[in-house]
């Protein structure tokens, strides 16, 4: 049996755990870098291997790049899925989770609590929003690892026009005071398997681990577990890192990551989410 692992860095902690876990399960792991894939319309190969020969596929990381390269990689995953190869996460779910604007519409339809949000190319409308909420967080619609995130305060309204000129659109969210921490809950197969607080560095406010944040064990309330499970399900993910943020009296869903790292929850809780993800895929492969 051959299981592919889509990745960009074989030394990545989660990728290494996927490789190790598949070997322990008696399965041959095949590392796949989609930037090296070739589609001849009748066949899809990667470094000489026909991807149609795979029994299943784990998606760890699709990598960055421009619009056309990203669409091409998703097209490959969709074609593999259409042939009946189990793909986790499903490509449609990864696409939806990666798009902060579209995913928020889906989360809103599931009646999940979300921070006030405004997405626009109109500078005046963006200014009105910031004036209403006081301080906003500007994020790339397609972003990851906390890159490109910044605070927009009343004193920095000039940044709105700059961001719109850079990106063509600005994605703004109400800033929720959070004492320098948020929550990453891991949902696999409709269950929460672990959760961590992500603590921002003392001199910062962004809590992403890739930006210097620190993981700490978190015990979710029943209501928070329910939020995480519903958010992951709303986007069709089979496994997800669901980011929550607590205000004084409410917990909000920030976003759903369809290709999350498992390192933080392992470091803080000794929970290896990759094992549960592999078990989920193997059940689907074996029918």
Image (tube, rainbow, N blue to C red):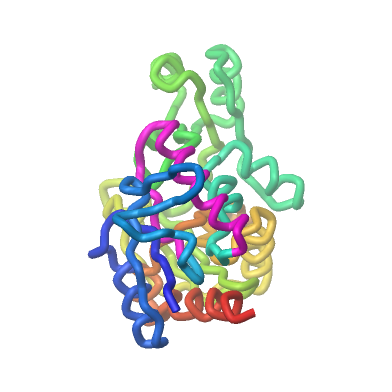
Q: Is residue 23 above or below residue 174?
A: below
Residue 105 image point, x, y percent: 69, 40
Image point 61% across, 63% down: which residue? 84
Tell me if residue 206 can be seen: no
Image point 53% across, 79% down: which residue? 282
Q: Is residue 180 above or below residue 70?
A: below
Foreground pick, 129 / 99? 99
Q: Quadrant of residue 163?
A: top left
Q: Is residue 74 magenta?
A: yes
Q: Is residue 258 left or right of residue 149?
A: right
Quadrant location of the N terminus in the rendered image? bottom left
Q: Is residue 47 magenta?
A: no
Image point 50% across, 69% down: which residue? 56
Tell me if residue 257 can be seen: yes
Q: Is residue 166 left or right of residue 96?
A: left
Span shown in magenta: 58-84
Residue 41 image point, x, y percent: 50, 42
Q: In the rendered picture of this protein, how many numbered marks are placed on residues?
A: 0
Foreground pick, 206 / 241? 241
Q: Is residue 241 left or right of residue 163?
A: right
Foreground pick, 236 / 10? 10
Residue 110 image point, x, y percent: 75, 52
Q: Residue placed farthest to the front in the image? A: 42
Quadrant location of the C terminus in the rendered image? bottom right
Residue 152 image point, x, y percent: 44, 28
Q: Is residue 130 left or right of residue 287?
A: left
Image point 38% across, 32% down: which residue? 66
């Amino acid at each position: 049996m051959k299981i592919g692992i889509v990745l960009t860095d074989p030394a990545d902690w989660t990728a290494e755990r996927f490789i190790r876990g598949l070997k322990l399960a008696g399965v041959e792991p095949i590392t796949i870098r989609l930037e090296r894939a070739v589609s001849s319309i009748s066949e899809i190969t990667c470094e000489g291997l026909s991807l149609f020969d795979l029994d299943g596929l784990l998606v760890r990381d699709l990598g960055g790049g421009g619009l056309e390269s990203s669409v091409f990689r998703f097209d490959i995953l969709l074609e593999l899925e259409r042939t009946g190869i189990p793909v986790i996460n499903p490509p449609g779910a990864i696409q939806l989770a990666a798009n902060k604007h579209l995913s928020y519409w889906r989360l809103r339809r599931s009646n999940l609590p979300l921070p006030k949000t405004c997405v626009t190319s109109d500078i005046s409308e963006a200014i009105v929003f910031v004036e209403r909420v006081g301080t906003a967080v500007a994020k790339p619609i397609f972003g990851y690892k906390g890159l490109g995130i910044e605070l927009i305060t009343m004193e920095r309204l000039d940044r709105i026009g700059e961001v719109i000129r850079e990106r063509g659109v600005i994605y703004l969210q109400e800033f929720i005071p959070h004492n320098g921490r948020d929550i990453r809950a891991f949902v696999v197969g409709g269950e929460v398997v672990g959760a961590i607080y992500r603590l921002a560095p003392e001199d910062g406010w962004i809590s992403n681990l890739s930006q210097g944040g620190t993981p700490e064990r978190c015990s979710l309330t029943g209501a928070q577990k329910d939020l995480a499970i519903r958010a992951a399900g709303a986007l069709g993910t089979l496994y997800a890192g669901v980011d929550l943020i607590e205000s004084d009296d409410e917990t909000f869903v920030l976003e759903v990551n369809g290709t999350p790292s498992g390192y933080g929850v392992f470091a803080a809780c000794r929970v290896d989410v990759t094992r549960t993800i592999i078990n989920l895929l193997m059940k689907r492969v074996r029918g």
